[in-house]
Image: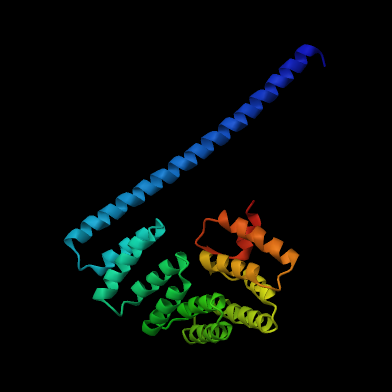
């Protein structure tokens, strides 16, 4: 290849590289603009609901909706205020207690979430809420209660003839395995088993299980490295609920 052809070849390569960089830049910019636009729309919707509430203060459904909007925008303190307003007017509103529990979880206030989840169950003893409290009991060092509540969830699901009975059975099976390892003193292995199961967890609970595995005295070097890598992957995961399989495609 003569000198002229080499120059042409190099120029073509540089052009292709520049094109790829430009395309990536445009895609990143469009993504950022799209996210900003979505956020602006959400804030407008929040303002619309607030304006409605100014004239309809007693409408608890509006406060619940505003609380959800705040929650999705990660304005957790504002969400709590709205749910508490509902609870003040309707102390037996299980939906308000349920949503308040979710906010507590995403604030990493697991003890408060636990108390509020118990109140939710008192008002509305459904299978899904028993699973939720079982997941909290796993990270609050209450493995025996976790198993009891998982079994209660399975029992309720069967009575209600829910279609996804196998989902509740998976919870029972997994917590039984967790308890077996936990009782033997294999703390890190017990949490790794829960983490690597096919179960979905609220993201903060998933992260807390990683932290508890890392804090275990019996952790091996290999387990520690695996949990550290998982922790980094979770940071890049946008969903508010998560399971181990979801992390397989996440790049660090």
Residue 94 vs 8, above or below: the answer is below
Residue pictured at 39% horizontal, 84% vertical:
122
Question: Residue drawn 71% across and 66% down?
Answer: 223
Colouring scheme, one of rainbow, by chain, secondary structure, one colour: rainbow
Q: Nearer the viewer, residue 194 or 151?
A: 194
| Residue nearest the viewer, comparing 53 with 100 | 100
Number of marks: 0
Q: Please state if 12 lies on the left or on the right of 52 as rendered.
A: right
| Residue 196 in view here | no
Figure check: 101 above or below 240:
below
Q: Is residue 212 visible?
A: yes
**Residue at the extreme right of the image, as rendered:** 1
Among all residues in the image, which is located at the extreme left?
55
| Left or right, 197 with reference to 83 | right
In the depicted structure, whether residue 11 falls above or below residue 61: above
Q: From the viewer's perspective, is 101 left or right of 13?
A: left
Where on the picture, by quarter, is residue 195? Answer: bottom right
Q: Would residue 162 be found to the left or right of residue 122 on screen? A: right
Q: In what quadrant of the picture does the N terminus appear?
A: top right
Percent from the top left, x then y, of residue 38? 40, 47
Q: Position of residue 107 (x, y in %)?
A: 44, 65
**Residue at coordinates 53% horizontally, 64% vertically from top-left?**
203
Task: Please provide percent x and percent y for residue 97.
Answer: 36, 74
Q: Residue furthest front?
A: 217
Point out residue 170 in the picture as x, y percentages from the top left corner: 60, 78
């Amino acid at each position: 290849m003569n000198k002229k052809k080499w120059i042409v070849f190099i120029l073509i390569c540089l052009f292709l590289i520049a094109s790829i960089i430009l395309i990536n830049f445009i895609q990143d910019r469009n993504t950022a603009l799209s996210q900003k636009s979505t956020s602006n729309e959400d804030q407008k919707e929040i303002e619309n609901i607030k304006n409605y509430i100014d004239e309809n203060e007693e409408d608890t459904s509006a406060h619940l909706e505003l609380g959800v909007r705040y929650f999705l925008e990660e304005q957790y303190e504002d969400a709590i205020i709205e749910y508490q307003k509902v609870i003040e007017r309707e102390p037996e509103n299980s939906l308000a207690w349920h949503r308040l529990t979710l906010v507590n979880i995403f604030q990493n206030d697991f003890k408060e979430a636990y108390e509020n989840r118990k109140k939710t169950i008192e008002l509305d003893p459904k299978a899904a809420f028993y699973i939720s409290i079982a997941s909290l009991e796993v990270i609050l060092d209450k493995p025996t209660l976790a198993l009891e509540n998982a079994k209660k969830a399975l029992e309720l699901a069967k009575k209600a003839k829910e279609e996804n009975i196998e989902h509740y059975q998976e919870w029972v099976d997994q917590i039984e395995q967790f308890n077996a390892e936990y009782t033997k003193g294999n703390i890190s292995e017990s949490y790794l088993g829960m983490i690597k199961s096919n179960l979905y967890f609220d993201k903060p609970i998933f992260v807390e299980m990683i932290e508890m595995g890392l804090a275990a005295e019996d952790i091996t070097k290999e387990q520690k490295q695996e949990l550290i890598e998982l922790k980094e992957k979770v940071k890049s995961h946008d969903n508010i609920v998560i399971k181990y399989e979801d992390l397989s495609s996440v790049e660090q």
